[in-house]
Amino acid sequence: MHTLHAGYRSMSLLVSINWDRLLYVCTIVFALFFGAWLGTLLQ
């Protein structure tokens, strides 16, 4: 149980440290999908 708790805590630390990078990647992916969708509408 201690190992599980320590693993969860370290994963939480990694997410909190890299939250801005994750948000940056999600924003780029969303923009690409939105641009592709908009491109199909304007053809």
Image: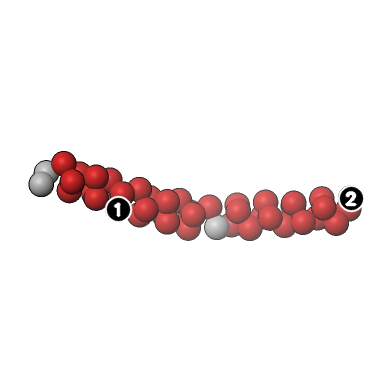
Depth order, front residue of 30/9: 30
Which numbered marker is on residue 8? none
* Residue at the (37%, 53%) spot, across then down: 29
Judged from the image, the secondary structure of the residue bearing numbered disc 2 is: loop
Depth order, front residue of 5/34: 34
* Residue at the (63%, 58%) spot, across then down: 14
- As shown in the figure, which amino acid type bears the numbered disc 2? Met
Depth order, front residue of 18/3: 3
* Residue at the (77%, 56%) spot, across then down: 7
Q: Residue furthest right?
A: 1
The answer to whether the residues at label 1 and label 2 have Cβ atoms under 8 Å apart is: no
- As shown in the figure, which amino acid type bears the numbered disc 1? Leu
Say few, some or many: other residues with alpha carbon within 10 Å of mark 2 (under 14 / 14 to 19 / 20 or more). Answer: few
Residue linked to disc 2: 1
Q: Within the image, what quadrant is residue 18 found in?
A: bottom right
Instruction: Give the image location of residue 27, x and y in percent.
Output: 38, 50
Residue linked to disc 1: 32
Instruction: Give the image location of residue 1, x and y in percent.
Output: 89, 50
Pick whichever of labels 1 and 2 is earlier in the sequence: 2
Instruction: Give the image location of residue 24, x and y in percent.
Output: 41, 55
Side of 41 where 32 appears, left or right: right
Distance, label 1 to label 2, CA atoms, is 42 Å
| In the depicted structure, whether residue 9 falls above or below residue 38 | below
